[in-house]
Image (tube, rainbow, N blue to C red):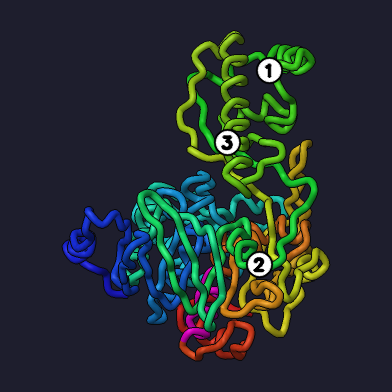
Amino acid sequence: MTKIARRKILKILGGISLGSFFPVIGHSAGLKEMSGNGIKTVNTDVLVVGGGTAGVIAAIQAARAGCSTIIVENGSQLGGTITTGGVGFPGLFHAWGKQIIGGIGWELVTETVDLNDDILPDFSIPFGKNHPQHQVRINRYLYALLAEEKCLESGVQLRYYETPVDVQFKGNRWIVHTIGKGTQTRIIADQLVDCTGNASLTSLAGFNVLKEEEIQPGSLIFRIGGYDLKSLDMEMIRKRYDEEVKKGRLIREDFRNNIEGLLRSAGDNIQHVMGADSTTSETNTLTNIKGRSSLLNTLRFLRELPGCENIKIVSMQPETGVRETYRIDGVYKITREDYVSGKIFDDSVCYSFYPIDLHDKDGVVPDHLRDGIVPTVPLRALIPKNSRNFIVAGRCVSSDRMANSALRVQASCMAMGQAAGASAALSNKLNTTPLNIPIGSIKSFLKEHKAIVP
């Protein structure tokens, strides 16, 4: 795809009136200001809500298909779990020695690797318990920059710091009311794509969503340093840690019952925030506070120990990553048996590959797939029951809890995002709803855009 010159991007940015308080980047959708109430109206072919792992890919795909496309993102940057959450090791793109997820997500990941002079993993390493070695370690800061650039190149409008508060279906179009910094906007879209991860847009639109009574713990990604691991007396540290847990000063589950694991990993993806929930601003606030206070309490404890006096926080993400909230009640629900058997549906639009990976208070023990098994995702699992002109992608895919524990990972979300973006674009062009698009047409379209389909 032809790159947009920097001066052209700056011209786009420069064309925005600061006095209008209208934080939109891009040129793909029309704007009309309403009188009296200060609400602006924007028309677009495709509206993607959520600029995370799936949303970025969905929006780029829809825009590359020639649709005017908008992303509404309530944060300050794109990338979601990869960037804001800090899980900068997306996977899995390969299964049993063969690539099974490609397309726009793979394009973005490999460009990030190349521009940072990194090296892709050796995908010929046997799978099973070695699956983390197939994750692609990337510079998440660079990924955020490239994701934004690719959206701009394709003509996607970016609306940061905005949140939908009302969703109505009228006259075969969706009307989404958003509120942001200094803005109230009415976005009128032909097709909606829910990539919120929480199915929040689906819920606002009036469709059923599903949630477990108990949800998986989340993780605050951070790095610690300032100590020499080899010089530490681990037996003494474990004893002191157990004493502090008994006193109630520390919570054993916060670091998967393993203070030694925290020190050996120097942080990264070791923390567990029990009951982590990003569904509402209130639960998300509590989740972030719990993650940060746990880290602070543990840091103070460690600095009291011989050899750990100079332990410091080297880096910390602004948000706790959440593994599980709401899922849509879709036309089809992917079950654990569907997933572990590698069922290929008549309407499969992408692959997914990861072990069943349910976290709990004791940690996680992945349940690996049998040799040769590669699960798939049907289009019906991306569509809420009784909906029109509406599709989802990412963690909120219609699935049971065990299947979702594997489907939620980043490469799979990217593949679902591209499938959703393609389906929304085709629906717009044919003036219909995603469920009515011939599956062969969707697959052919995805192949044209370098996606890998079952």
Residue 262: image x %, image y %? 63, 28
- Label whose residue precedes the other's in the sequence (3 or 1): 1
Residue designated by label 1: 234
For residue 409, which numbered disc appears in the image?
A: none
Residue extending farthest front: 36
Residue 316: image x %, image y %? 49, 33
Q: For the residue marked with disc 1, what is the amino acid?
A: Met
Q: Which residues are the magenta region?
A: 417-428
Of residues 109 and 274, the one nearer the viewer is 274
For the residues bearing labels 3 and 1, Cβ distance under 8 angstroms: no
Q: Label 3, label 1: how many angstroms apart (C-alpha)?
A: 29 Å
Residue 436: image x %, image y %? 62, 88
Q: What element carries label 3?
A: helix
For residue 288, which numbered disc appears in the image?
A: 3
Q: Label 2, label 1: how many angstroms apart (C-alpha)?
A: 54 Å
- Label whose residue precedes the other's in the sequence (2 or 1): 2
Nearer mark to the viewer, of 2 and 1: 2
- Label whose residue precedes the other's in the sequence (3 or 2): 2
Q: Is mark 2 on a helix, strand or loop?
A: loop
Nearer mark to the viewer, of 3 and 1: 3
Membership of 424 in magenta stretch: yes
Look at the image and tell me in which quarter the N terminus lies: bottom left
Question: Is any atom of residue 141 visible in this view?
Answer: yes
For the residues bearing labels 3 and 2, Cβ distance under 8 angstroms: no
